[in-house]
Amino acid sequence: MSEDSISTPGFAELGLAAELLEALHALGYETPSPIQAQAIPPLLAGADLIGQAQTGTGKTAAFALPIVQGVDVELARPQALVLVPTRELAIQVAEAFASYAARRAGFHVLPIYGGQSYVPQLAALRRGAHVVVGTPGRVIDHLERGTLQLDALRQLVLDEADEMLRMGFIDDVEAVLQRTPPQRQIALFSATMPPAIRAIAQRHLREPREITIQARTTTAMQVQQRCWMVSGLHKLDALTRILEVEDFDAMIVFARTKLGTEELADKLAARGFATAALNGDVQQNQRERIVQRLKDGQIDILVATDVAARGLDVERISHVVNYDIPADVESYVHRIGRTGRAGRSGQAILFVTPRERYLLQAIERATRQKIAPMQLPSTEDVNDRRVARFLQRITEARELEGLEPFQALVERYEREHDVPALEIAAALARLVQGDTPLLLQPEARAPREERQARHAPDERQDRHERHERPERHERGEWAGAGEARPRAPASGAMLLYRVEVGRAHGVEVRNLVGAIANEGGLENRSIGNVAIRHDHSLVELPADLPPSLLAKLARVHVLGHKLQLRAADAGDGAPRASRPASERAPGRGAGAGKGGYAGKTGYAGKGGYAGKGEYAGKGGYAGKGGYAGKTGHAGKDERGAANERGERSKRTLPPRKPR
């Protein structure tokens, strides 16, 4: 029996309430995924559970549906807590809870995460939230403030536990677990089961049920996979461009819900494409007619749901477009398996919104294949194809029989109206084209900020790659005692800060960057160089951070220890300020000296920031009267660039802050 034909129990057989079944039907859910089918019954029965499954296998519904069913909406207090590693996932999970509880009047879910103001979170907690979804650091903040009470907690979920371990939050997770009532139910989900996660399960879970899902993760090698990061254009416009430019015979476009297939098929048909929808509501005889029309070439595009397309094998299908990203890796593999069958080649295109990047990463990890990004066809590309097709229509029409009467009419019009044949041909072409413009209008250039955001690397992927393959800065290494990781220069002025965690506390660069970016709401690329010392660390942050954010970062926990972030001073062995990237021009002898980031001997050269011939010219970053020339770390009270004679630069940095 093929995997496509394996029967799966329906949601109605899992013991879910009628109101949840109605919500799932409205969302277009047809059959549960393997993790949902195996996890929902024991969770409804109140058992603790360990679920080992890849990200994107449908785990959210597996724990969210039992929680929604068990919540007492009359009790306006947190009854379930879900811990997740990132703010993006917190938002995603909270939105899923809201959609599943659409038929439960009075149900409230609240995401809490770093980078958002406390004000709306405090207001929502005062009103009463039944389910709280949060990152460990922000949850601990609320627990310490007394604004989050867990005495009525019934269920606790640890989602992506191994990811929280990797990001350095596992001690924070332990701290939260110790503050929960002893009678609560715990569900732990993790893609892998490292010893630290297994130890947590042994300490806190009571006779847990263990479920391991082995997802099908092999993809056909003859299928070329590409992805488009959704930005700028609407998805429908982007799909239209792809359909106009790509050379395809037949195509399946996958949408998430039944309603989505109908709406998308109607919109594509309105744009002139031969399209039909295929979903679970289509009767078997009608399904057979649609498939036959696809095989015969009467329709070219099939918009389908996952279940409706299972087992579909049509030789014409050359392309698969994932208009909505699938909820699990196995569904993705099934989808792209509709092309490239029986040794044929195929194309698979995946649309990914910013909030769905973690699903893309899960697909790449599970399939062990990198999905290459694609550039959408430009306006010029689309217009070139439209013109080529129009000219081809003329060529084909000239080969038809019976043109003589039309030629006679054109000649007659030309004589009677004294109009050149070229103008007559243009008028006839306009008549054939109708009201639909032949060419797209040139697109306006996107604002600089939008273009930068569009090409910005994903935060979690960037962090992962930095851990796997640390870069070497073009100016050398940030020298000094301890681990150092130079990073791409951030734009704008930077200040150096000290945090009271270091190697002695088990901290690595990835832990520190992850905590600051996640809890401080900062872009990953805005964090500068990081140096890990024995009992403390140094990190460069934007100089314009508000005092309230710096105070919040000082309270952030990493591996169970508060950062206690403060401005670094001269005694910390590194400069407190760095110049904007635009001003970081190398002096004589390039951007770095013989041995490292700036000076001849490393970070501070002979006597300060820059030594002979490096960062700031022959005399170093500052001369006799400035920051760190040959004669020492700092002069009297100025920190401007100076030459060897001690001449002050025109640009003077702000006075040193007191400790």
Image (cartoon, helix red, strand yellow):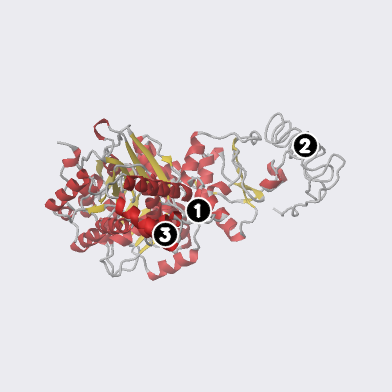
- Say which label, 3 or 1, has the lower sequence index: 3
Q: Secondary structure at mark 2?
A: loop
Asked where in the image residue 22 lies, by quadrant, the reply is bottom left
Q: Residue lying farthest right?
A: 645
Q: Mark 1 Cα within 10 Å, few/some/many (few <14, many 20+)? A: many
**Going by the image, does 25 lie left or right of 157?**
left
Give the quadrant of the N terminus.
top left
Marks 3 and 2 sit apart, C-alpha to C-alpha, by: 93 Å
Judge whether residue 368 can be spotted in this image.
yes
The spot of residue 143 in percent (x, y) is 44, 59
Residue type for callout 2 = Gly
The spot of residue 98 in percent (x, y) is 32, 62
Do the CB atoms of the residues marked 3 and 2 lie less than 8 Å apart? no
Residue type for callout 1 = Glu
Residue type for callout 3 = Arg
The spot of residue 136 in percent (x, y) is 44, 52
Residue ID for mark 3: 415
Residue ID for mark 2: 607
Q: Mark 2 Cα within 10 Å, few/some/many (few <14, many 20+)? A: some
- Say which label, 3 or 2, has the lower sequence index: 3
